[in-house]
Amino acid sequence: MSVENLSVASSTAARKGVVIIGAGLAGWHVIDAIRAKDTEIPITLITADSGDRYHKPMLTMAISQNKRASDLVRASGSGAANTAEVTLLANTQVTDIDPVSQTVQVRSTAQSDDALTTIGYEKMVLAMGAHPIFPKSLPQDLVWHVNHIERFSQLQEKLAAGSQHVAIVGAGMVGTEIAEDLLKAGHKVTLIDLNDAPLSQMLPAKATARIAKAIESQGIQFLGGYQVSAVARINCNSNDSEDGEKLQVDYAPLSTDADNTDIQPLEPLIVDHVIASTGLTVDEQLPAAAGVEFDRRTGIVVDAATLRTNAANIYAIGDCMSINGVACRYVAPLRAQAATIADDILGHEHSGYDHKPPMIRLKNKAISVMVTGVPQAAGNWQVKTESDDELIMDLIDDNEAVSATVTIKAPAVPKA
């Protein structure tokens, strides 16, 4: 039963039930898991957007496939809510959580007033995800991100005008995938990172050097070891840009020798768009209000077996949570996480969530990169196999056990 206003929600508040904050993949997975085992328990889903169901990882591949946001939406929020028989509070902001009275305060962003509505809960699931980090040098009014389908749609509309020059700041998984996607769509791409090669915060130099070589061989300009210091709008009086406006990206080597007076200022990049891919962070407002244990770097702390927070009757799932000090920001484990939360909420016996690091695959065609375990750039990486076509390395921990493995292969050459 999808609803469009808060008055309906307040009339059902006495029934309480489960309140889920966040309608991304994590929130909808929890709904699916609960409804598979209980079709009666009331569920209220609160989201700041429309609540549409889509697969977020597709955002880094969709531009070259000429897919619009509407093509990626599997079901509208209202339609999915009706099917699952949940109360959807779309375009609604949570302003406070009271863990003592077990209530949340919300207000509709679609209405002109700031009236607050109080909704009770028996169990709550925090599934609000994480949001992009924008360093001061990347002003949000000038810089894009592709962490949400609405922002992706706006960027795609701008790029539809024809071939353009796009600078991507941050060469982690997402930045490296977007770079190839934009290149395949016919755009000129410059990828900038603090490190000497892509994925350098995850993998050793021997592995990342191959990735850098592969993406550069495609025609992507990679600027490694550089820091963006400013992004500003400029007027080029050019016929090939909208209103003659472009963006100037100032950047410099991350570290320089102060005594070297021969270093010349770098010519700034002049581009049409800048995309930030500089990591994710979790907003601490709601965790603080709920009184749950929170780490600024990794998010909400949960019990590894039950995904309960330290606050009674409150769970967390997905990008906003961490297990044993490690942020959980991959899609693959969501289904198992949701099943555990559903069983725990419904009082069913369960064996507990067994967290296993997911297999990580870089979605680039220029090179095959697969990682298992918990990789980290620093550590005792040892070569297992090395040839022109393949590199396999193991990360050996203090107990001489393999804690991560990276496999890099050259792309297969199509048969004539």
Image (spheres, rainbow, N blue to C red):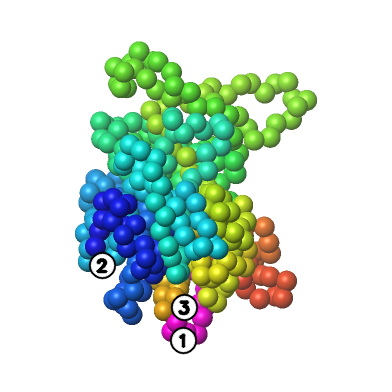
Structural crowding at the residue carrying mark 3, measured as other residues with C-alpha within 10 Å and reported as few (<14), some (14–19) or many (≥20): many
Q: Residue at 43% of width from left, 65% of height from top? A: 121
Q: Residue at x 46, y 46 (%)?
A: 175
Residue 375 falls within the magenta-colored stretch: no
Q: Which mark is residue 279?
A: none
Res. 349 mark: 1
Instruction: Note whether 166 is above or below 348 in the view shown.
Output: above
Q: Is residue 82 above or below residue 195?
A: below
Q: Which residue is mark 3?
A: 344
The image quarter containing residue 240 is top left
Residue 43, how many percent across, how many down? 34, 67
Q: What residue is drawn where x is 74% and y is 30%?
A: 257
Secondary structure beneath disc 3?
A: helix
Q: Amino acid at mark 2?
A: Glu
Which segment did they paint magenta? Answer: 347-358
**How far apart are the alpha carbons under marks 1 and 2?**
25 Å
Left or right side of 56 for 190: right
User: What separation in Å lies between label 1 and label 3 (alpha carbons)?
Assistant: 7 Å
Calculate the distance from the C-alpha at mark 3 to the C-alpha at mark 2.
20 Å
Dot 1 alpha-carbon crowd within 10 angstroms: few under 14, some 14 to 19, many 20 or more: few
Quadrant where the N terminus sits is bottom left
Marks 1 and 3 close (CB-CB < 8 Å): no
What's the mark number on residue 85? 2
| Closer to us: 283 or 275 | 283
Instruction: From the viewer's side, name the closer residue of 71 and 388.
Output: 71
Rendered image quadrant of residue 290: bottom right
